[in-house]
Image: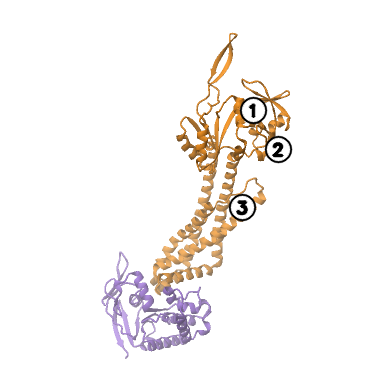
Amino acid sequence: MRKNSIRFEFSLASRFLTENRMQTFLIILGIAIGVSVMVFLSALIDGLQANLIEKTVGRSPHIVISSDENAAAEAVKSLNGNPVLVLDATRKTMRPMVEWRNITAGLTADQRIKTALPVVEGSGLIERGQISRAILLKGFDLNQADRIYNLTGSLVAGSPNLPDGAVLIGKDLAADLGVSVGEPITLELSGRDSLPVVVDGIFDLGVSAINQRWMVMDQRRAAALLGMGDRVNTIEVQVHDVLQADALAAEWSQRLPGLAVESWQESNASLLAGLRSQSSSSYTIQFFVMLAVILGVASVLAISAVQKSKQIGILKAMGIRTGSVSRVFMIQGLVLGTLGTLSGLGLGLLMSKAFIVLAKQDYTLLLKPMTTAIIVLSTIVAAVLAAYLPARQVSQIDPIEVIRNN
Amino acid sequence: MGITRDFGDKVKTRVLFGVDLEIRRGEFTSLIGASGSGKSTLLNIIGALDRPTEGKVIIDGTDLGTLDDDGLALFRNQTMGFIFQSHFLLPQFTVLENVMIPYLIYAGRATPTVKKRALDLLERVGLSHRRDYRANAISGGEQQRAAIARALINQPRMILADEPTGNLDTSNTENVFAMLREINQEFKTSFIMVTHDRVLAERTDRLLIMRDGQIVEDICHI
């Protein structure tokens, strides 16, 4: 019997809604505009943030593992004309890692980690003719490094089939030195004789700091040049879920005592703070839009409840139950909410498309299925809840009052 | 039996003073009395729209005092037919749909039997040609006849009519009263009709006159 009553409740609700088409249309439009703003706003913010994060960490390690102790550097200085050996503890170079093979194997075995790249690093100078530039010499396995940096895909000069021991330099560095592929340059490393090397390729990683400073070669060759033996300075890690990098870093920090494990979030704390405040202002706007939707639905149904009180009174005399009357108005909230939300979703998608075409931004909007589902469901639920007060009020109508007052 | 009804929370106004009344099946009773004599209140209590402050209402063996609000609603729907001075048809529905509403409230969908019954009732009240009109697109007399058909759709055992002809002219009044009488005789439906029209009341089986919350005269015409 209850199931059958609901059929009548639906038909009554739909007659009430279609009776005053303009009112119904306007409130659906109101909800739709609210929802489209929420959808568009979250697509915009999410797209912007994903783009910023991608720019920040797309082609860089998400976690860097290094020794947490400074390496003591040895240097020969002259004191009163006599050479003396001193230790310089202020140098920022980190103590090299010996156990890097085991650590790398352990990292690679972690399903959440995409790639782990042992890196040999050292600073030096490149000279060509009168020009000299400070460089960062990076030594790593080129094939494996492609998974982080896509170096071979970023070559602007030189063959992608690089020979063993190939030397690559950044685009801006090459331009500064006026060097092209196949030409020799001189590499100066502290405590070593000048070493002539030939440039095999020039890359453009899209980050000027890298393009200006990096010289890349095979790990073993770099280690030999830097006198590192079978040791590395850092292990660079990329993970599958960038936003989980900090949690993963904390976990690995526990497992690797004596090593510093730093996530991109730690090195980019201010960016993240910016993103967070952006998100919270977006949530604030969405909250007030939602509030406006709720008030809109509630006021329209409250007016409708007053308009229909006579008919509700007579229906109650004819035996409709109080709960049924409530449901008639809750159903109206549900129908208004659903139609408004779905058209708002369509409108929001249209706005997003139009924005991409018109604004010509270099980032795309990102409509996350989860976010969309939350907006859609919460608006529908809000519309039903908004109907609750008018529904309660109208269901309390006393048929005798209606009949007596005619 | 012994029905008393007070209104008001702080200052109690007693409208009915221990009314005892027994209605026999198939009886056409009319209830007259000055405004404020309590006749509408009595009708509402008999019709399960209102509860007595004291006393019991027993209809066909059911003590209405034992039913909760939903129970009373169902009881009204299944047992009672209401005709009011104002027709109270729902303007969102057609005449035919309006007639079926008391059935639809609980059944949701009209069976062919019910639809045929509704059409028969419309035929009987002379509104077959208006069946698909919106309820607010027909005349006042037609609307009141549609309301009569609506009161009958669930085949109630009792019809309560509160000034059913109050808004109608003489010829429509005659028409509607004849119709009620006919239904009363054909279906053996009990009627209680509140009216101001003494002449009309004289033509019913039993005439109750109320004054100051009591039945002061009970005149049987059979």
Give the residue drawn at x 50%, y 79%.
B95
**How far separated are the C-alphas under marks 1 and 2?**
23 Å
Residue A262 seen in this snapshot: no
In front: A176, or B18?
A: A176
Vertical position of residue A134 compared to residue A294: above or below? above
User: Label 3 amino acid?
Assistant: Ser
Pinpoint residue A366: horizontal percent, then vertical percent. Answer: 58, 49
> Which chain can be seen in orange?
A
Give the residue drawn at x 38%, y 72%.
A400
Vertical position of residue A309 compared to residue B169: above or below? above
**How many neighbours does mark 2 have within 10 angstroms: few (below 14), some (14-19), or many (20 or more)?**
few
User: Label 1 amino acid?
Assistant: Ile
User: Label 2 amino acid?
Assistant: Ser
Q: Are tags 3 and 1 found on a single chain?
A: yes
Which residue, given by chain and number where applicable, does mark 1 sit on?
A135
Looking at the rendered image, the disc whose residue lies closer to the viewer, 1 or 2, is 2
**How many neighbours does mark 3 have within 10 angstroms: few (below 14), some (14-19), or many (20 or more)?**
many
In front: A163, or B137?
A: A163
In the image, taking residue B170 as reference, residue B36 lies left or right, namely left
Q: Disc 1 or 2, which lies upstream in sequence?
A: 1
Which residue, given by chain and number where applicable, does mark 3 sit on?
A352
In the image, taking residue B76 as reference, residue A230 lies left or right, namely right
**How far separated are the C-alphas under marks 3 and 2?**
41 Å
In the image, taking residue B145 as reference, residue A190 lies left or right, namely right
Give the residue drawn at x 39%, y 73%.
A319
Residue B43 seen in this snapshot: yes
Pinpoint residue A350: horizontal percent, then vertical percent. Answer: 62, 56
Pinpoint residue A223: horizontal percent, then vertical percent. Answer: 59, 28
Q: Disc 3 or 2, which lies upstream in sequence?
A: 2
Vertical position of residue A401 compared to residue A338: above or below? below
In front: A141, or A365?
A: A141
